[in-house]
Amino acid sequence: MEDRLLTHVLQKNLRFSKRVKEAHAAVLIAITDEHDPKVLLTRRSVYLNNHAGEVSFPGGKRDPQDTSNIVVALREAHEETALSPFDVQLVGDLPMQKARNGMLVKPVVGLIPPQVQLTAQPTEIDRIFFASLKNLMDAPPVPYEVRFEHQSLYFPSMRVENEVVWGLTARMLVSLFQYGLNYQKDWPFLLNSPAFKVKSHR
């Protein structure tokens, strides 16, 4: 699939669900509308209580006054990155995802200008960066170690722009590839193999 066609394919394949279910939270998957589309990602502040230091999409929890999942995604993206809602061309949404804490999260997809000016909200975001959509599609699943009380598990991750993308964010990207680009990325639930982990870092 040629790069210049990726955003066209997204617009052709994605739409908003007719059955609207209010999510506990929503994120905005913002993609630059250009020859080599880039995905807007953030690294959460290390001082946050939840998912500190992890790569994520702009987004957050629903407020009582929020009228839709789209409103949540656009509001949170503006609060975290100063992305104006007027700069977002809404394309559609993806199936609901469940976070580790049981929270239901709705991904909303939109296109943004390539040269959009963004500013990280310092109490929530340590870094704003863009990753090539094509590179994310091609990135092999690399084991990422998560230590629990009695054992370590190795979850698949993508390594892009010197960052590790795993968990809910990675699953949403895989969903974007599947529903938006007709691309089925191999993404196992676990890569529970230390030997593979060592091999991957050579």
Image (cartoon, rainbow, N blue to C red):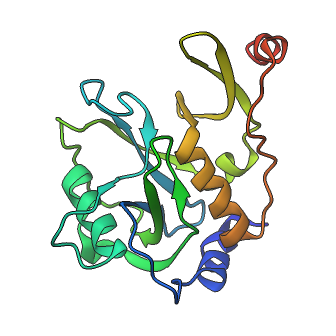
Q: Position of residue 154 (x, y in %)?
A: 69, 23
Q: Position of residue 96 (x, y in %)?
A: 54, 65
Q: Report if residue 30 is visible in the image.
A: no
Is 117 on the left or on the right of 96, as rendered?
Answer: left
Is 15 on the left or on the right of 45, as rendered?
Answer: right
Q: Position of residue 161 (x, y in %)?
A: 53, 34
> In terms of image quadrants, where is residue 89?
bottom left
> In terms of image quadrants, where is residue 167?
top right
Q: Quadrant location of the N terminus?
A: bottom right
> In terms of image quadrants, where is residue 184?
bottom right
Above or below, 49 relative to 23: above
Q: Quadrant location of the C terminus?
A: top right
Callout count: 0
Q: Residue at x 78, y 19 (%)?
A: 200
Q: Position of residue 127 (x, y in %)?
A: 33, 35
Q: Report if residue 172 is visible in the image.
A: yes
Q: Residue at x 58, y 55 (%)?
A: 172
Q: Residue at x 39, y 33 (%)?
A: 51
Is 38 on the left or on the right of 68, as rendered?
Answer: right
The one nearer the camera, 53 or 19, is 19
Is 162 on the left or on the right of 45, as rendered?
Answer: right
Q: Residue at x 53, y 27 (%)?
A: 162
Above or below, 192 relative to 183: above
